Image (cartoon, grey):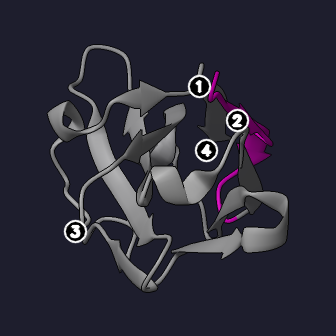
Amino acid sequence: QVQLVESGGGLVQTGGSLRLSCAASGRPFSWNILAWFRQAPGKVREYVAGIRWTVLSINSSDSVEGRFTISRDSAKNTVFLQMDNLKPEDTAVYYCAADRGQYIRRDSRAYDLWGQGTQVTVSS
């Protein structure tokens, strides 16, 4: 059974950095898109960044553009989210999600498989 396992969350001060990892068991190219979402208390789940596994394609939301970078390690079936210059408004539970589609979609309803989430807290 395919699973997504996130790690790397924690508490960091404003301006700091964290690197999240999402390890996918099974064959990731059976899930063509891997993406990061986040959800803060009382808010809807928000798209952060996505990566297409087969023909490489990447995009990020405007709110994190220039600060967050998504990347992959194909040999380890792992996707990373490097988060730099963190702000208190980045505080949320971060989720990894997988989709079998051809294009990166920002709607969380398109994603069939989700990890358990990892907490990121940015103190001011």
Instruction: Give the residue pinned by disc 3.
Output: 103
> Do the numbered discs 4 and 1 sit on residues whose CB atoms are within 8 Å?
no
> Do the numbered discs 1 and 2 sit on residues whose CB atoms are within 8 Å?
yes
What separation in Å lies between label 4 and label 1 (alpha carbons)?
A: 23 Å
Amino acid type shown at disc 4: Ser
Mark with earlier residue (3, 1) = 3
> Do the numbered discs 4 and 2 sit on residues whose CB atoms are within 8 Å?
no
Does the stretch in magenta take in 3? yes
In the image, what residue occupies the spot 24% across and 56% down? 101
The image shows residue 76 at horizontal and vertical percentages of 84, 61
Mark with earlier residue (1, 2) = 2
What separation in Å lies between label 1 and label 2 (alpha carbons)?
A: 6 Å
Vertical order, 89 against 1 (above or below): below
Closer to the camera in the image, 76 or 85: 76
Vertical order, 44 against 19 (above or below): above
In the image, what residue occupies the spot 44% across and 69% down? 51
Any mark on residue 124, and which?
Answer: 4
Vertical order, 56 against 68 (above or below): below
Frontmost of labels 3 and 4 is 3
Any mark on residue 117, and which?
Answer: 1
Closer to the camera in the image, 7 or 78: 78
Vertical order, 5 against 65 (above or below): above
Q: Secondary structure at mark 4?
A: loop
In the image, what residue occupies the spot 64% across and 27% down? 3
Amino acid type shown at disc 3: Tyr
In the image, what residue occupies the spot 47% across and 77% down? 54
Res 23 → quadrant: top right
Amino acid type shown at disc 2: Glu
Q: Seen in the image, is 121 located left or right of residue 66? A: right
